[in-house]
Image (tube, rainbow, N blue to C red):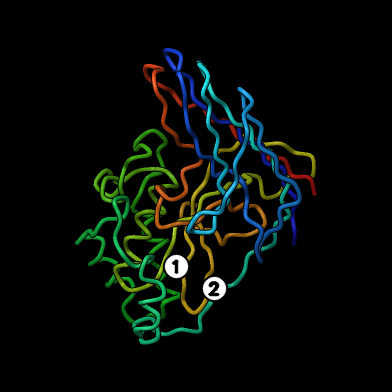
Amino acid sequence: MNWRLRVVHRTGYHYTLPATQSYNEARLTPRSDHTQTVVTNRLDTTPATREYRYTDYWGTVVSAFDLHTPHTAFSVVATSVVTTSGPRPPIRTHTWADLRRPDVTDAYAEYLQPTAYTPLDAELERMAHTLSARTTPADAVFAIAQWVRDELTYRPGSTGVHSSASDAWLAREGVCQDYAHVVLVMLRAIGIPARYVSGYLYGEPRARPGRTVHGESHAWVEVWTGGWWAYDPTNALPVGARHVSVARGRDYADVTPLKGVFTGGGTSTLDVAVHLTRLG
């Protein structure tokens, strides 16, 4: 079953002193691929400035903005309408031996290596091998995702955007970003290529068209077991019509919705508000 969703994502910085100039990059444009189609997309900034668009190494559309006049705030409003499709089944064509072939490990090396957010962790690696013993790669994904969901407590504010998978695992709590990072550590430890996905989740599965809900950025994982498929470990849910994907990469650092640098301005605070409406 297809859905049509409107996403309005407002985000931006406030500076304690005027910033004399700033440069910002936004990854707020949903993807068009075999799971969803972008019908409309628009980004508006305050102060108004020219937008430069390009596609980054990971295939994400990036909007870049630079301001060269003093300003005390900078905000971006991204408005998109996206048609999404129902969940796709896991791909089960590859065995463990297939995943260990040199051509596979070479092609997907970037999704098998540790990163600052997904570092090597001996305890998580041992548990990943235990959970994946005597099962298929695709079933190992479900086993690991369910284990992480059982072991972590969802608690907003318990971690930050700079927290690694090891930080969340040590605390045994976190948010969707942390669930995704911990799952990535474990999948990569057993040789399953896996990547981080940012986007949105419409929170009411039975909502009628016209219903608007307050949301926030969401994160899940995509895995390669002969082809790419997606799973949401925070909610133990196949990725489907209620999900809107925006960016993919190795971890959160590759998909940050808004980041930038500025001169002057003292210190800055980031504000975010997301609203999703089911249109059909």
Check residue 142 in the rendering and tell me which mark sits there, or answer none: 1
Which amino acid does the dot numbered 1 rest on? Answer: Phe
On the rendered image, what quadrant is the N terminus found in? bottom right
| Residue 63 placement: quadrant | top right
Amino acid at pointer 2: Pro
Q: Secondary structure at mark 1?
A: helix
Question: Is residue 196 or residue 204 the one in the foreground?
Answer: 196
Mark 1 neighbour class, 10 Å CA radius: few under 14, some 14 to 19, many 20 or more:
many
Q: Pick the residue in front: 69 or 16.
A: 69
Q: Are marks 2 and 1 in contact (CB under 8 Å)?
A: yes
Whether residue 236 is situated above or below residue 173 in the rendered picture: below
Residue 244 location in percent, x, y? Answer: 62, 51
Query: At 63% from the left edge and 46% from the top edge, which residue is drawn?
Result: 202
Q: Would you place residue 138 above or below residue 87 in this image?
A: below
- Give the residue displayed 47% in from the left and 59% down from the top: 221
- Element marked by disc 2: loop
The label on residue 215 is none
From the image, tell me which residue sits under label 2: 90
